[in-house]
Each structure stands twice: as C-alpha cells, then as structure tokens.
C-alpha cells in the first residue's frame, strides 16, 4: 500500500448492490470488478450470501457488496436468512445500486424501493438487460415512469452481460466514494476465503445443471481444503433434503455429479490459478433449509 493511498486525496467506500432476485446483481458486480467472484445462473436466488468484491485503483478503492435478492415470501428459514443478509448489507454504505430489469417493474421492486427509503446513502437506479429489450423505443418512457416521483441520484441503463455502459456506472460510483484510506491490499479482490469460493462454484454448477426445484434443496460444504505447491485438493459434500433428491444429483451412473465436478473444477482452476483435484459426495440432511441450527452449521450465519 503506497503512502498516497493513506493520504487525504485517496477515496474509499462501500457500495451495496441490491434488488429483487434474478435481475443480474452478481453479473453486474463481476463485470465491475473485472473478475468472477459471485456465482451466476439463470435461476433466481442463486446468491445466498453477502459477498464483498474489491476494486482498487491508484486513486480510489470501491468495495462492492453483492447481496441475495430481496423477496416477499419468507416461508422457510433460509428465505428469512437471505432477506436479512440483504438488509444488513445496507448498513453504513456510501452508495446503493438498485438493480431492476429493463421494461419490468414488479411488486418486489417496489418493496425493495420502500426499504431503501430509510437509508441516507445516494441510490443509483441501474436498469439492467437493456440489450434484451425487443423494442428500444420503450426504454425512455419506461425510465421516465420509474423515476417519476422517486428520489434517485442517477439513472444508468446498461447491460451487465455485455458490458454496455458499465464504465459510466463505475465512474459514477467512484465519484461518490468519500475521502479515506485504502481498506484492503491492492491484490485482494474479495473478503471471502478460497474455501468459501470453492463451495460456491460447486453450488453454481448445481444451479445450472439441475432442474427447477432440486437446486434449492442443495447446499455445499467443503470438508477438506489442502494446498500443496500448485495443487489444491478439495473434498466437498453436496447436502440435499431427501433421498430422491440425492439420486437426482448423482444421476444415472453418477454422470450428473461428474459433470458438476468437472465444470466446478475448471472454474476453480481459473479463479485460483492452479491445478485442482476435486472430490464430491452427496448426503441427505432432512429439512436443512428450514432449520436455523442446520443453517448456522452450514455457514448461513449472517445477521441477528
């Protein structure tokens, strides 16, 4: 860390990325960081934990906080945990990125907006997925209708997937960071350990390769994480809630679990810049997603 980064000219702050499920929050944070930290899939509620991503330049350090999607249904303990983790991320931030889908405003978007009314930080409305809008002429009227009567510091239409206009958002965010010393070393890109990231990368493949319901009954626990030279040996358990789900995750002749393991291993090698040996097991823990004690033991321990 250089002396200049401890001086009065340096700026550093926290930015919460919030919104309802499946609007592209994790994709946006990964794009802004230039590195994949948060897992992504086409299914809602892929993100289950609050994850910090750190972007450092000679003049400013931005700490982005990716959050689970805020949703109105809290039927299970894990749903309550997800909402609490997202709410906790709003404490003491310097800026909020409120992400919505282009040409789509829902009751859940409105609920997120109501939650944001209680914070002091400026809120930037991020209209994502503009590249998917079939009729571009509808974008401006949509933006005007959403902004009308609401207090956003800025409105930025963009595509997190393609990168369109994300540089504009990055500049706006950096301009809003307060004066302060750098909080993380230059080479640190997240507050999470490699062990945590390994579990998430396995869960990402479960979200992508399984059907509609089963992924939500799975979680991943890393039991062993050993590093020897340029090799990491990782053993992880995929927990499910019922025996029938175990058979689905394993697949015929173990083929689906092999696909999950192979894809996750490649992602780990890309992120960790080393060789990875990954071993997966599937075990049953009945009702883990609605058991607060089980959730804590499996790493879901944020918030009161």
Image (cartoon, rainbow, N blue to C red):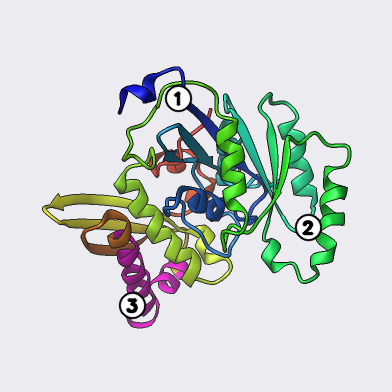
The CA distance from mark 3 to mark 2 is 40 Å
Of the two numbered discs 2 and 1 on the same chain, state the one appearing first in sequence. Answer: 1
CA distance separating discs 3 and 1: 53 Å
Is 184 or 283 nearer to us in this picture?
A: 184
> Within 10 angstroms of label 1, few (less than 14), some, or many (20 or more) residues?
many
Compared with residue 119, is residue 254 higher up or lower down, i.e. above or below?
A: below
Instruction: Please report the bounds of the magenta region as a residue range.
Output: 244-268
Viewport quadrant of the N terminus: top left
Report the front residue among 220 and 190: 190
Could you tell me if residue 297 is visible in this image? yes
Question: Which SS does the magenta portion mostly show?
Answer: helix
Judge whether 60 appears above or below 165 on screen: above
Q: Earlier in the sequence, mark 3 or mark 2?
A: 2
Q: Which residue is mark 1?
A: 10
List the residue tagged with mark 3.
254
Callout 3 touching callout 1 (CB < 8 Å): no
* CB atoms of marks 3 and 2 within 8 Å: no
Element class at badge 1: loop
């Amino acid at each position: 860390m250089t002396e200049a980064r401890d001086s009065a000219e340096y700026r550093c702050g926290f930015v919460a990325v919030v919104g309802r499920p499946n609007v592209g929050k994790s994709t946006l944070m990964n794009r802004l960081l230039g590195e994949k930290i948060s897992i992504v899939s086409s299914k809602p509620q892929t993100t289950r934990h609050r994850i910090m991503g750190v972007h450092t330049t000679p003049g400013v350090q931005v700490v982005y906080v990716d959050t689970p999607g805020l949703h109105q249904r809290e039927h299970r303990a894990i749903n309550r945990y997800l909402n609490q983790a997202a709410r906790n991320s709003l404490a003491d931030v310097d800026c909020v990125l409120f992400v919505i889908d282009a040409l789509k405003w829902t009751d859940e978007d409105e609920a997120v907006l109501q939650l944001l009314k209680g914070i002091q930080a400026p809120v930037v409305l991020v209209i994502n997925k503009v590249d998917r809008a079939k009729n571009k002429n509808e974008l401006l009227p949509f933006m005007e209708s959403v902004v009308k009567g609401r207090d956003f510091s800025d409105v930025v239409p963009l595509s997190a997937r393609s990168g369109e206009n994300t540089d504009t958002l990055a500049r706006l965010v950096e301009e809003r960071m307060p004066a302060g010393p750098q909080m993380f070393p230059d080479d640190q890109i997240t507050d999470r350990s490699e062990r945590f990231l390994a579990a998430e990368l396995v869960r990402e493949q479960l979200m992508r390769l399984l059907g509609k319901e089963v992924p939500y009954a799975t979680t991943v626990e890393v039991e062993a994480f050993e590093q020897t030279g340029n090799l990491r040996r990782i053993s992880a358990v995929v927990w499910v809630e019922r025996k029938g789900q175990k058979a689905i995750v394993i697949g015929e002749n173990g083929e689906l679990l092999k696909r999950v393991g192979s894809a996750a291993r490649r992602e780990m090698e890309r992120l960790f810049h080393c060789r990875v040996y990954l071993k997966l097991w599937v075990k049953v823990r009945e009702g883990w997603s609605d058991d607060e004690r089980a959730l804590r033991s499996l790493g879901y321990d944020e918030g009161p």
